[in-house]
Image (cartoon, coloured by chain):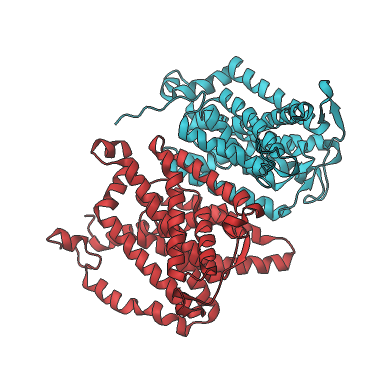
Amino acid sequence: MPCGEYFTDYESRMGLVRWRTQKIALALGLPIPFIAPFLLGGGTVTLLTQAYIFAIAVLGLNVILGYAGEIVLAQGAFMAIGAYSTSRLLAVGAGLFPALAVGGLISALVAVGFGLPSFRVKGFYIAISTLALQFIAEEWFFVNPQLAFIHGGTTQSVPSNVGLVGPVGALGTTIDKYLLALVLLLVFALLSLNLSRTGIGKTFRAIHENDLSASVLGVNVFKNKLLAFAIGGFMIGVAGGLFGFQIGFINAEYFTLGLTLEHYVMLLFGGLGRVWGALLGVGVVTLVQDYLNDGLNYLADLTGTNATALLPVFFGSIIIVVLAVEPKGVLAGLGKIKEYLRTWPFAY
Amino acid sequence: MVDWVTFIDISLSGLGLGALYALVAMGFSLIYKVTGVLNFAQGQIAMIGAYGVVVFGTATVLPAAIPAWAAVLVTVLLGLVLGLALERVVFRQFIGEPVLSVIIVTLALGSILEGVVFFLYGQNAQAYPSALTFGGQLSLPLGTSIQAAYAIAVAIALVVVAVLMLFFRETVTGSILRASASDEQAAMVLGVSIERTIALAWTLSIAITAIGGILLATSSGGAAVSIENTGIIIFAAVVLGGLDSIPGAFIGSIVVGVLQELGSYYLVGGTAVYVPFTDVQANFGAGFGEILPLILLLVVILVKPYGLFGTERIERL
């Protein structure tokens, strides 16, 4: 990348692919994830699929938390809503895309519902009300057998051989699921990138920085907050549906506050409000978690203690250290290094 | 037909539960008032308190047990030290950081503490040393009765609350805490060391919360993972009472305790009441008692977000 500022107009400045290096990187890099599943082992492909799915959920969280700045602690609940709705629709043979879309919409609806208090209050009240939602979903709603007529049973297996729309375009193999998750991730990543470049994204950021100033400048704060909840909730719901479909089995125990925290680690590690940060965070954290899980399992067998319970300790420590050292995430840290190298040996 | 003796019984144990919650809730309010930190890890700190007695008082982790009273004392001291350490090591880094960072730090802290407890004991309940378990029933007038363990825990909780109230009202240190909570800069001008006050607030808050955890465990005969849920339920209490009001936290806790006990009895299982004019039982399924305070919380946030005694925040550009 050359030294100095080279852009002469707004459009080229805001372009997604701005430099020749980026064009080459795109042309060489994009095919890799599409070829990868044919070269890698089944276990790695499943792990990557899960990483892609979590990446969609984290991008959804990024829209609400990173762009609009609302603290949502109901990630697990939104994913559960998406997963159970998708599972029920797949069972009646709706096909994957309609099921995911409806699951996402229901999730978005609930997210908007719990965003309603933002009409009067802000910040931590939303955190508290969504935490209440998470608790209600996790401890009562999804584990209550009396409500099976709504959610269809606390544990249920998700139909595996389904079509994309109705019975058309059947998919079921691991590689099919991998490619599906990859394509959806690319779609949602592009959506997020474009969202942050357009007026809506800028409005969200204005609200994030100072909602009172934004409303003085004529931004409808309440409407835009709800819009962020809807967009983010939809993405998280779709991710939940995909998650259930990929595993083939859903259990209320998957969608706990622990999952919410895991996604926070991913987002904060990579960098809040940055699509690439979210993707980087998901990738790094998923890989580290996988190795650490193996290690802790080994340790648990070796010592006879339940060492696997220490995983949250590790994640909690990462969050605190990242927030203390570089609150904007690893990507911002890398950006600083790049800026330094770009102008080296001069300071400016 | 409503059975009044049962109703009074349930309400009494609700009041008691509220008094136990009050300690955890007051720990929360104290920190919020003085430092502005919303501590989402209160439940886990209470759980650490509850399991602390198990660690020291029984020979499950340590090679030998120490007497029960000493175990309680050591746990409370541990709470004091933990409070001081958290303030020094963690929360001092985040003074002046956005609310979001602080909330997430407390959540992370909660997951660390939870992980430690799960590592030591898994998700199983642990019985308390026999000196701290009390059997039997205590008879009260009007034919009602209450479990002895419960009554003792509640009595101690009320004593602690009373001592705290007196501490805030009568001692110099208490008024320093109140002064820095109401206006930090004015307190600084008058020569109060904010640094020391914040450390004191953390120490006190964590110790109270740990005592709350110990008493919650005593009232049910042993430490259980469900004590963690207190952290979420007390939000209903503190939001209802107003986030920055310590008496509000107490009153809110009482309301939430009564609501939870009544909900658990009258809206769950075979004892559920019948929907008026039908023969359908209003049975909402297991665990609804704990959900009821959260529904109240959502209603309060929508209708009166600053609670009964909270101060309304006015923002200026």
Give the vertical position of B200 relative to B174 (above or below). below
Residue at x-position 53% and y-position 25%: B245
- Is B233 on the left-hand or right-hand side of A10? right
Give the vertical position of B20 relative to B55 (above or below). above
Residue lying furthest front in this view? B277
The letter of the cyan chain is: B
Give the vertical position of B59 relative to A263 (above or below). above
Q: Quadrant of residue A21?
A: bottom left
Q: Quadrant of residue B5?
A: top right
Residue A68 seen in the current view: no
Near-viewer residue (A328 or A152): A152
Count of number-bearing discs: 0
Near-viewer residue (B30 or B227): B227
- Is A260 on the left-hand or right-hand side of A97? right
- Quadrant of the frame with the N terminus of chain A: bottom left
Chain A representation colour: red
Residue lying furthest left in this view? A8
Residue B178 seen in the current view: yes
Q: Position of residue B75 (x, y in %)?
A: 72, 38
Q: Position of residue A179 (x, y in %)?
A: 43, 76
- Quadrant of the frame with the C terminus of chain A: bottom left
- Is B65 on the left-hand or right-hand side of B201? right
Residue at x-position 42% and y-position 20%: B186
Near-viewer residue (B65 or A136): A136
- Is B257 on the left-hand or right-hand side of A102? right
Residue at x-position 41% and y-position 52%: A326
Q: Position of residue B183 (x, y in %)?
A: 44, 22
Residue at x-position 22% and y-position 64%: A15
Residue lying furthest bottom in this view? A39
Q: Position of residue A313 (x, y in %)?
A: 59, 54
